[in-house]
C-alpha cells in the first residue's frame, strides 16, 4: 500500500521529533509541528494506520509512537532532506585531517577519532586494496660484509625496509646480481607464488646468495600478507554512554566490546557506492540489531579504497550524519589523491 502525502508528512515529523527528543511522539506534538493544519484526531487515526502498516511502533499502550526500522528506511529513502556542510563544518573537517600523509595507518587512526568527535557516535575507518598486492621493485643496500638493508616497494606505492643479517658472507660485488635476480623473477607476483619461484632458482646461484635471497623473499612475503589484511581502526566507543538507548550498562558494554574485540565483523560493503545506510535488522551481526550504521567510501589511490562507518542508535539524525560522513570521505579522497582538502563553499547571501 502506497502511503498518502499526509501519512508521509506525519511519519517524517515522528522520525525527526524522536531523533531530537529520544521520547515517543504523540499527536499533540505532531499537530504543533504541522502548524495546526491537521487535527489531533486525524493525526491519531493516521498514526494507527502507520503502526498497522509497520512504519511505527508503540512502546506502551498510553505512550506516543516511535519509528520502526521500516519507518526509518522509508525516511532515509524518500523523506530525509539532504544536507550540505556549512562553511564552519567544512573547516572543522579540514582542521581534523590536516596531518602528514606519510603512514596510512596513522592517517586512518586520526580520521577515526576525528569522525567520532564530529558526529558524537562511535566510528570506524578501514583501508584495503581492491586486489592482491605484489612487489614492484627490490633494492639491497650493503651495510657491511654480514648485513644489508632490504628495500621493498609494493605496487600500491608503499615502501618498506628492514635490516637483514646474512647467514654467510656475501661480497659487495654480488649485490647487483642478487638485485637483478629479485627484480626479474620476484616482482609482480602474489605472495603465494614467491616461494615457488624461489625453489625454481635454488640451483642457479651459490649458497650464500641463495640464503640472502631467501631472507629477502621471506620479508617480501610478510609485507604482502600484511598488505592484504584490512586495516580497521575504531574510535569513540564511549560516546554510547551518552545516549539514552544505552543507559543499560549491560547493553552498552555488549556493543562497546563488539566495537573493540570483534571489529572485523563490522559492516564492510564491497560495492563501490559512495554511501550505504543499514538500519536495525538490516545489519547481519546480532550486536548491531538495535543500531544503525552509516558507511561512506573514499579512494586512497593506487587501486586502494577505504570505508568510514558510524554506529549509532536507530534514532539517528541520518541527514546530518550522512552529510558529515560524506564530507570526511571527500576530504580523505582529496588528501590521498591530490593532497588538498575540501573546497570552502562561499556563504550564501
Image (cartoon, rainbow, N blue to C red):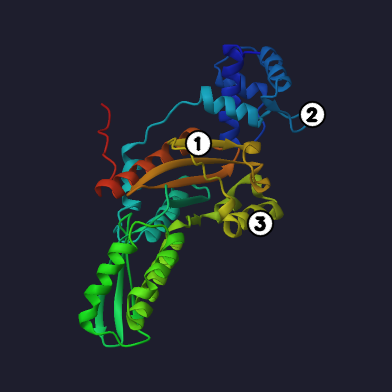
Q: Is residue 16 left or right of residue 173?
A: right
Q: Is residue 290 left or right of residue 104?
A: right
Residue 159, located in which quarter of the rendered image?
bottom left
Give the quarter of the figure containing the N terminus.
top right
Q: Is residue 32 left or right of residue 165?
A: right
Separation of marks 2 and 3 at Cα, in angstroms:
30 Å
Earlier-in-chain disc, 3 versus 1: 3
Above or below 295: residue 161 = below
Q: Which circle marks residue 322 in the picture?
A: none
Q: For the residue labelled by badge 3, is the local secondary structure a helix, a strand or a loop? A: helix
Residue 37: tell me if it is visible.
Answer: no
Earlier-in-chain disc, 2 versus 3: 2
Residue at (49% x, 45% y) in the render: 309
Residue at image mark 2: 61
Closer to the camera in the image, 81 or 183: 183
Front label number (3 vs 1): 1
Above or below 110: residue 195 = below
Density class for disc 2 (Cα within 10 Å; few <14, some 14-19, many ≥20) is few
- Verify CB contact (< 8 Å) between mark 2 and mark 3: no
Residue at (31% x, 84% y) in the render: 147
Q: For the residue labelled by badge 1, is the local secondary structure a helix, a strand or a loop? A: strand
Earlier-in-chain disc, 1 versus 2: 2
Amino acid at each position: 500500500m502506497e502511503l498518502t502525502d499526509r501519512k508521509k508528512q506525519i511519519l517524517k515529523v515522528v522520525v525527526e521529533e524522536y531523533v531530537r527528543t529520544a521520547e515517543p511522539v504523540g499527536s499533540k506534538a505532531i499537530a504543533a509541528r504541522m502548524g495546526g493544519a491537521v487535527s489531533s484526531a486525524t493525526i491519531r487515526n493516521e498514526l494507527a494506520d502507520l503502526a498497522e502498516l509497520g512504519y511505527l511502533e508503540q512502546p506502551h499502550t498510553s505512550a506516543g509512537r516511535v519509528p520502526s526500522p521500516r519507518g526509518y528506511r522509508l525516511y532515509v529513502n524518500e523523506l530525509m532532506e539532504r544536507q550540505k556542510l556549512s562553511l564552519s563544518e567544512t573547516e572543522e573537517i579540514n582542521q581534523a585531517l590536516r596531518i602528514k600523509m606519510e603512514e596510512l595507518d596513522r592517517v586512518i587512526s586520526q580520521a577515526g577519532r576525528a569522525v567520532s568527535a564530529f558526529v558524537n557516535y562511535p566510528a570506524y575507518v578501514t583501508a584495503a586494496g581492491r586486489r592482491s598486492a605484489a612487489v614492484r621493485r627490490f633494492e639491497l643496500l650493503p651495510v657491511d660484509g654480514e648485513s644489508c638493508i632490504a628495500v621493498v616497494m609494493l605496487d600500491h606505492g608503499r615502501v618498506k625496509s628492514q635490516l637483514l643479517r646474512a647467514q654467510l658472507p656475501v661480497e659487495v660485488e654480488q649485490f647487483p646480481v642478487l638485485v637483478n635476480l629479485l627484480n626479474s623473477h620476484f616482482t609482480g607476483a602474489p605472495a603465494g607464488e614467491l616461494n615457488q619461484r624461489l625453489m625454481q632458482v635454488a640451483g642457479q646461484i651459490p649458497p650464500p646468495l641463495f640464503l640472502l635471497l631467501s631472507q629477502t623473499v621471506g620479508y617480501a612475503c610478510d609485507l604482502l600478507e600484511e598488505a592484504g589484511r584490512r586495516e580497521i581502526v575504531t574510535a569513540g566507543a564511549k560516546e554510547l554512554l551518552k545516549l539514552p538507548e544505552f543507559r543499560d550498562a549491560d547493553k552498552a558494554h555488549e556493543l562497546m566490546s563488539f566495537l573493540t574485540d570483534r571489529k572485523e565483523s563490522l559492516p564492510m560493503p564491497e560495492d563501490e557506492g559512495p554511501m550505504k545506510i543499514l538500519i536495525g535488522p538490516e545489519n547481519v551481526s546480532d550486536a548491531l540489531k538495535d543500531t544503525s550504521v552509516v558507511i561512506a567510501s573514499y579512494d586512497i589511490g593506487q587501486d586502494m579504497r577505504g570505508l568510514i562507518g558510524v554506529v549509532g542508535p536507530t534514532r539517528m539524525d541520518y541527514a546530518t550524519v550522512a552529510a558529515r560522513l560524506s564530507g570526511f570521505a571527500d576530504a580523505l579522497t582529496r588528501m590521498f589523491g591530490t593532497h588538498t582538502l575540501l573546497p570552502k563553499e562561499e556563504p550564501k547571501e
